[in-house]
Image (tube, rainbow, N blue to C red):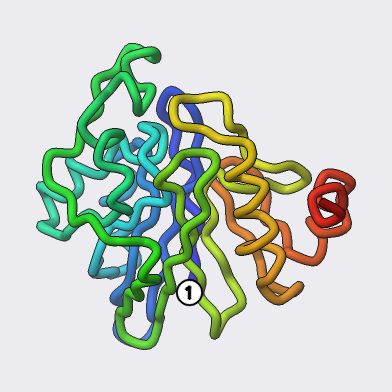
């Protein structure tokens, strides 16, 4: 089961719940804001979180993570390269938006090792997709042909590389090596757009240009 939770902070971000319907256990991805709303949904749906998973360290994806961790006592996991974003409100962009977001307690993983997270019958594979930020990852649910991609790719466009740590060449490489090689029917669930598929994005002019180089 996948639930999209549009959460409104300084920006609106799509957080996601990915849950095993039988056991009601699962994961929360990118809780950027509205801590109370998230708690309400968890209670209403009778969901028990195994972990909070972050696609990258920008504050609009992490803003409610620490409060949820403190209340629910579930770990927060993100790529090792995200440590600076977790600790530095300048780098995670929160200071520029009048906030001070920090994550003092995080379980860091090495994304190049492609770790997996499992809750009941749902399983997520981690794939490194640096470019938007050095720590950007996607979480791939192969059995259900889903990928939670954060800000790496949106419907009709690639992610931006204009912020601290962004790198356009890294993003292009990630799109070609990690997104384009997923099955065309894979649904891409991003932080700031409607869902799309790998096949649909590969038809777009920006992606065609990447594939030619």
Looking at the image, residue 49 lies above or below residue 30: below
Where residue 126 sits: x, y (%)?
Answer: 42, 67
The part of the image, by quadrant, that contains residue 85 is top left
Q: Nearer the viewer, residue 26 or 182?
A: 182
Query: Residue at the spot x=43%, y=42% of the render?
Result: 134
Where residue 79 sits: x, y (%)?
Answer: 32, 53
Query: Residue at the spot x=61%, y=33% of the render?
Result: 160
Q: Nearer the viewer, residue 102 or 46?
A: 102
Where residue 55 sits: x, y (%)?
Answer: 42, 51
Instruction: Describe the element under mark 1 as helix, strand or loop.
Output: loop
Q: Which residue is mark 1?
A: 1
Q: Is residue 135 left or right of residue 105?
A: right
Mark 1 neighbour density, 10 Å: few (under 14) some (14–19) many (20 or more): few
Q: Is residue 179 left or right of residue 80?
A: right
Looking at the image, residue 114 lies above or below residue 129: below
Q: Is residue 76 left or right of residue 33?
A: left
- Whether residue 43 appears in this view of the structure is no
- Whether residue 118 appears in this view of the structure is yes
Residue most extreme to the front = 213
Q: Nearer the viewer, residue 173 or 145?
A: 173
Where residue 183 sits: x, y (%)?
Answer: 70, 76
Query: Residue at the spot x=36%, y=39% of the render?
Result: 57
The part of the image, by quadrant, that contains residue 46 is bottom left
Query: Residue at the spot x=38%, y=87% of the render?
Result: 121
Q: Is residue 196 left or right of residue 65?
A: right
């Amino acid at each position: 089961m996948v639930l999209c939770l549009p959460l409104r902070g300084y920006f609106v971000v799509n957080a996601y719940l990915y849950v095993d319907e039988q056991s009601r256990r699962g994961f929360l991805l990118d809780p950027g804001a509205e801590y109370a709303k998230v708690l309400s949904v968890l209670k209403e749906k009778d969901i028990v979180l195994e972990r909070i998973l972050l696609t990258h360290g920008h504050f609009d994806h992490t803003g409610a993570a620490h409060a949820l961790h403190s209340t629910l006592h579930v770990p927060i996991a993100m790529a090792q390269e995200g440590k600076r974003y977790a600790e530095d409100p300048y780098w995670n962009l929160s200071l520029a938006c009048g906030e001070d977001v920090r994550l003092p307690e995080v379980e860091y993983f090495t994304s190049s090792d492609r770790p997996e997270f499992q809750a009941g019958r749902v399983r997520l594979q981690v794939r490194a997709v640096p470019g938007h930020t050095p720590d950007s990852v996607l979480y791939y649910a192969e059995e259900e042909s889903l990928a939670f991609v954060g800000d790496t790719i949106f419907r009709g466009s690639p992610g931006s590389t204009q912020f601290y740590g962004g790198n356009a060449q890294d993003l292009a490489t990630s799109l070609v090596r990690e997104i384009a090689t997923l099955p065309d029917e894979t649904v891409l669930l991003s932080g700031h757009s409607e869902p799309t598929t790998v096949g649909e994005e590969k038809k777009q002019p920006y992606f065609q240009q990447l594939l030619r180089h």
